[in-house]
Amino acid sequence: MPRSERLLDLIQILRRHRRPVSGRTLADEMGVSIRTLYRDIATLQGQGAPIEGEAGLGYVLKPGFMLPPLMFTDEEIEAIVLGSRWVAKQPDKRLSAAAADALAKIAAVLSDDLREDLDATTLLVGPRSENVEAIDLGVVRQAIREERKLGFLYCDAEGAASERLVWPFALSFFDKVRVMVAWCEMRQDFRHFRADRMSELTATDIRYPRRRQSMLKEWRTTLGAAGQSGAKDTSG
């Protein structure tokens, strides 16, 4: 769970308690360590949340506290709308719906004048690409989040098909194609897989042995090295 979401959840939990509640109880309900809970309490207090109490005595949120309304500049609003509209045009149906929902949630907490700016922006997104994947990109995104292996059948540019088992760690969205970046067990190297050439996608329960952030860093390093010594084809 992102830290910003966790802090909001902590505020909501404190709102449910009219009397001081112990840090241990809060930590257990949040599913975090007591040390993390104390850090989150201190962060919220530093941001102005009227949380009273201390370790060993419990915590309570003073009544009447409201989260401040979201404020954006004109360019920030344009960036939010343009980005959301672009994602909404992607063939990943769940991600598309999430973009529309996120924009609606943002609009709901904006002031009236900013909401009007949000509705009136004239930055448009072109028609969606005709390349439609046969796989569910939501499965790919979930495997990346959970650091789990994926199996699938891949057809290269020459039409040759092969079965792959990979460690996915990134998904790139281009105008006409989506590309998964992964460590391929067959090639024993980083490889790029066009989503429209993937089929028979199988999500596994097998966690791969490395963290995705470390693989992403190493992959970026290999891209830099390839750029200096001549581009290396790592597709498929």
Image (spheres, rainbow, N blue to C red):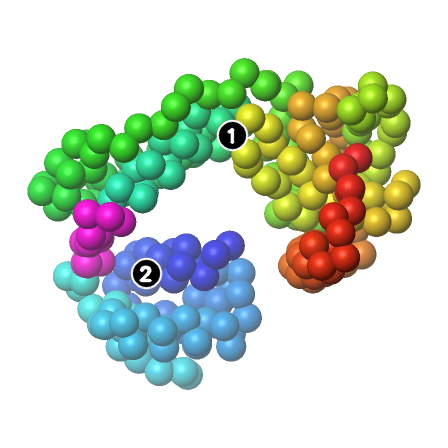
Tag 1, which secondary structure? Answer: loop
Is residue 72 in the magenta section? Answer: yes
Q: Quadrant of residue 42?
A: bottom left
- The answer to whether residue 52 is visible is yes
Q: Residues under labels 2 and 1: Cα distance?
A: 40 Å
Query: Quarter of the image holding residue 98?
Result: top left
Q: Where is residue 93 in the image (x, y as percent from the top left)?
A: 50, 25
Q: Is the magenta stretch mostly helix, strand or loop?
A: loop
Q: Which of marks 2 and 1 is nearer the N terminus?
A: 2
x and y percent of residue 26 in the render?
A: 44, 66
Q: 33 or 114, which lies in front?
A: 114
State whether residue 131 is above or below residue 94: above
Q: Residue at (78%, 47%) from the top-left corner?
A: 232
Question: What secondary structure is marked by label 2?
Answer: helix
Instruction: Tell me what residue is drawn at x 44 percent, y 33 percent.
Output: 87
Q: What residue type is labelled 2?
A: Ile
Which picture quadrant has residue 135? top right
Circle 2 crowding by C-alpha within 10 Å: few under 14, some 14–19, many from 20: some
State the residue position of label 2: 11
Disc number at residue 175?
1
Relative horizontal placement of residue 180, taking residue 167 as reference (left or right): left
Amino acid type at mark 1: Asp
Q: Farthest residue toward the top?
A: 130
- Front one among 78 and 52: 78
Q: Is residue 101 above or below residue 16?
A: above
Mark 1 neighbour class, 10 Å CA radius: few under 14, some 14 to 19, many 20 or more: few
Q: Position of residue 139 (x, y in %)?
A: 64, 33
Q: Which mark is residue 167?
A: none
Magenta-tinted stretch:
66-76
User: Which residue extends farthest left?
Assistant: 113
